[in-house]
Image: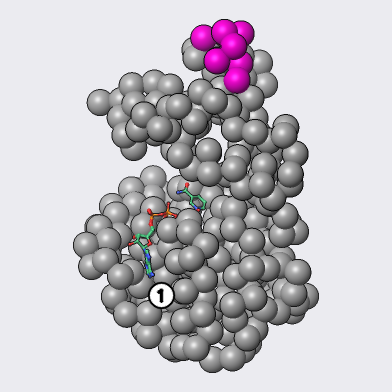
Amino acid sequence: MDIEQIAVIGAGTMGNGIAQVCAAYGYRVTLIDIVPKQLERASASIQRSVEKLHSKGRLTDEQREAAATNISTSTEITAAADADLAIEAVLESLTIKEKVFAELDQITRPDVILASNTSSISITELGAVTRRPQQVIGMHFMNPVPLMQLVEVIRGLETSDETTATVVALTEKLGKTPVEAQDYPGFISNRILCPMINEAVYALMEGVGTVEAIDTVIKLGMNHPMGPLTLADLIGLDIVLNVMNVLQEGLGDDKYRPCPLLKRMVAAGHLGRKSGRGFYTYD
Ligand SMILES: NC(=O)c1ccc[n+]([C@@H]2O[C@H](COP(=O)([O-])OP(=O)(O)OC[C@H]3O[C@@H](n4cnc5c(N)ncnc54)[C@H](O)[C@@H]3O)[C@@H](O)[C@H]2O)c1
């Protein structure tokens, strides 16, 4: 099936980035969110990002034009009816995502692939609320979407080879690199990243090193672009805690237990950049 029209559901951080990239690469996009203000914010943010990338020579004149003209917005999920592919990027909640998938299953043509940008929810479980689990798949874009190269392509238990091949080909057409992963808690990315961050928080709690020392060792010693505590502040400590809970529950191994200091910081509302305070303080 040729994909021309893509519905992106959820116009937050990830949804607007996904919509921007799809539009710049020539797809017509319907960006859907139940909150009108989020659609306004998304449009402004896409415009800013496109101008910046264009001024740096990372988008051609044609791509800039395409990004400006290819996106329409709606507050109704029924606007996904004409889509050849739907990419869901709503809040990380199983209940909300299951509802969205059940609705998309009713609204879209039976041959349409339904993808989720989830960081940790089971693709198999999302597929199970539809009548087309073979066409349900994970498309895990990284933040910020226009800049990051990777898309983790997650196969649920029922996801077909055909669906996977279509999504891999689409990812390449978007100028990104797809990597296939199986549907186990945290997939590949968060299975490895979040325990590393959690271990850094243990090292801090136990006084092995200061915040700066831990970040500097990993940055300069391992050549990571930023230290794990800086990265935790960027991702959001609540998100890291949520992933650790998913890993511990889903894999049943105590090695994934969230660090008590991480739990305390989340309880105190020290969530990182978004709350102004995490391991570092922000203006
Ligand atoms: N932020 C990241 O760094 C990151 C990275 C990779 C994957 N993800 C995943 O992407 C998804 C979205 O994350 P985000 O950071 O963009 O969240 P966000 O909070 O910025 O945006 C979520 C949006 O979904 C909308 N929404 C909620 N319910 C909806 C519904 N029923 N229909 C339509 N829209 C609805 C909200 O109004 C909001 O605009 C999550 O599953 C998250 O785990 C996030």
Q: Residue at x 47, y 74 (%)?
A: 99
Camera-nearest residue between 27 and 72: 72
Q: Residue at x 26, y 66 (%)?
A: 35
Q: Residue at x 71, y 59 (%)?
A: 183
Considering the image in quadrants, where does the C terminus appear?
A: top left
Quarter residue 206 falls in = top right
Where in the figure is residue 7, as x and y percent of width and height?
44, 76
Mark yes or no: residue 248 visible: yes
- Left or right: 185 in relation to 120: right
Whether residue 204 appears in magenta in the rendering, the answer is yes
Write down the region rendered in magenta: 202-210
Q: Which residue is outermost to the bottom?
A: 109
Q: Amino acid at mark 1?
A: Val
Quarter residue 68 falls in = bottom left
Circle 1 Cα neighbour tier, 10 Å, few/some/many (<14 / 14–19 / ≥20): many
Where in the figure is residue 42, as x and y percent of width and height?
30, 60
Would you place residue 146 above or below residue 169 in this image?
Answer: above
Whether residue 26 appears in magenta in the rendering, the answer is no
Q: Label 1, on which residue?
A: 29
Where in the figure is residue 158, as x and y percent of width and height?
74, 74
Mark yes or no: residue 176 visible: no
SS category of the residue bearing label 1: strand
Where in the figure is residue 217, as x and y percent of width and height?
61, 14
Camera-nearest residue between 239 and 48: 239
Camera-nearest residue between 52 and 260: 260
Considering the image in quadrants, where does the N terminus appear?
A: bottom right
**In which of the image's four quarters is ligand 1 placed?**
bottom left
